[in-house]
Image (cartoon, rainbow, N blue to C red):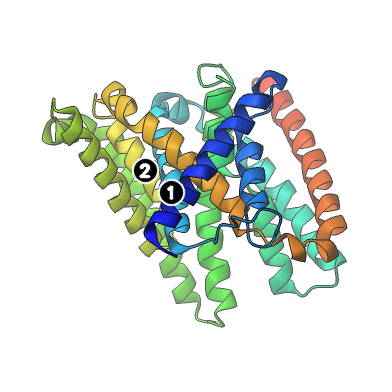
């Protein structure tokens, strides 16, 4: 596809997304489903509009930028003091959600007659929430300052750490490896990277801030974007995922004393590329393959929602009773 044509199509995607999102904003509809719907409608598989957009490497890369920027901003705004001060509650809350959702995923996989490996994949998919969607919704609904938000973000972090380790284990298992040391090394690497970044953010933030300090907005933007991509890439190479790497980079830079400046340059980038992430997700879907799995997926979604509500009630009751773990 010629570059000019690709630029026009990407611009039209953003313009249509803006128009639809603005039209339904009064109804309280978040932008996320709008972006996904626009992506689906303009995808090749849907085949309605003459200007179908291919899910190219360019669209995929723009979507990756959006994902890592969403998680990077989550890291920048993350309240470390609240996180460490309520670690016990977070472990209980995160563990409850993960265990319940993994249980329904395993049961669902086995109910469909699949084998253990397939059921484990489904369990991993249902075990955690999407960090990108959770972060985007908290931003859109203006709930970041709310008192429950640190708990929500903390649970999201716990889930992300879990899924990184889970992917390391499942990836090795699906690859046919049977050596337990291979799995152990993957897990150790994940924990070491996460622990090192949390320790840096906790104790070396001011030092890092002095090293990276600059008053030039342009240079700060370049620096922030570059640091984010480097840590996202490191996370991807280590098997911790690019999103976790970007979150940890935000955690570190957010502890440098430059939080407000970083937010000033990163938020506009997050909003633009975040839209591409959800639009790209819609473009990547093949709606022609939905038919055979539509009812099973709907059933799984309903069960997951119900179990999440149950888990939320359990955690709320534990907190109301003054429960503290650890």
Which residue does the numbered mark 1 point to in the structure image? 244
Q: Secondary structure at mark 2?
A: helix
Residue drawn at (66%, 53%), measured in percent from left and top?
49
Residue drawn at (57%, 83%), measured in percent from left and top?
176
Look at the image and tell me in which quarter the C terminus lies: top right
Question: Looking at the image, can residue 326 be seen?
Answer: no
User: Mark number for residue 79?
Assistant: none
Q: Secondary structure at mark 1?
A: helix
Location of residue 185 in the rendering, given as x and y in whole percent from the top left corner: 41, 69
- Label 1 and label 2: CA atoms lie apart by 6 Å
Kindly indicate the quadrant of the structure image that contains residue 241: bottom left
Depth order, front residue of 52/66: 52
* Number of marks in picture: 2
* Side of 270 relative to 291 (left or right): left
Residue drawn at (61%, 49%), measured in percent from left and top?
39
Depth order, front residue of 276/211: 276
Which residue does the numbered mark 2 point to in the structure image? 248
Question: Looking at the image, can residue 154 be seen?
Answer: yes
Location of residue 227 in the rendering, given as x and y in whole percent from the top left corner: 26, 45
Look at the image and tell me in which quarter the N terminus lies: bottom left
Q: Residues within 10 Å of mark 2 (few under 14, many from 20)?
A: many
Say if mark 1 contacts mark 2, CB within 8 Å.
yes
Depth order, front residue of 316/218: 218
* Side of 237 relative to 36 (left or right): left
């Amino acid at each position: 596809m010629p570059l000019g044509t690709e630029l026009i199509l990407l611009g039209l995607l953003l313009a249509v997304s803006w128009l639809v999102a603005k039209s339904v904003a009064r109804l309280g509809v978040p932008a996320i489903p709008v972006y996904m719907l626009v992506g689906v409608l303009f995808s090749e598989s849907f085949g309605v509009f003459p200007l179908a957009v291919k899910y190219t490497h360019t669209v995929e890369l723009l979507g990756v930028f959006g994902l890592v920027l969403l998680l990077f901003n989550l890291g920048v705004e993350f309240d470390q003091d609240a996180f460490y001060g309520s670690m016990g509650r977070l472990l209980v809350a995160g563990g409850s959600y993960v265990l319940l959702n993994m249980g329904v995923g395993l049961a669902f996989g086995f109910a469909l007659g699949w084998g253990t490996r397939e059921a484990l994949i489904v369990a991993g998919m249902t075990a955690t929430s999407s960090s990108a969607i959770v972060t985007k919704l908290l931003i859109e609904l203006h709930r970041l300052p709310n008192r429950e938000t640190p708990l929500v973000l903390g649970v999201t972090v716990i889930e992300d750490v879990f899924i990184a380790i889970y992917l390391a284990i499942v990836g090795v298992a699906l690859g046919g490896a049977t050596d337990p040391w291979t799995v152990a090394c993957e897990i150790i690497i994940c924990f070491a990277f996460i622990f090192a970044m949390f320790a840096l953010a906790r104790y070396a933030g001011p030092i890092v801030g002095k090293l990276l300090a600059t008053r030039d907005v342009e240079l700060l933007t370049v620096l922030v974007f570059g640091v984010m991509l480097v840590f996202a890439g490191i996370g991807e190479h280590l098997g911790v995922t690019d999103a976790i790497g970007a979150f940890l980079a935000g955690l570190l830079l957010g502890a440098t004393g430059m939080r407000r400046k970083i937010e000033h340059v990163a938020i506009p980038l997050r909003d633009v590329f975040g839209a591409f992430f959800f639009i790209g997700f819609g473009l990547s879907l093949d709606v022609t393959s939905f038919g055979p799995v539509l009812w099973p997926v709907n059933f799984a979604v309903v069960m997951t929602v119900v179990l999440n509500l149950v888990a939320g009630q359990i955690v709320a009751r534990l907190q109301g009773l003054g429960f503290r773990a650890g």
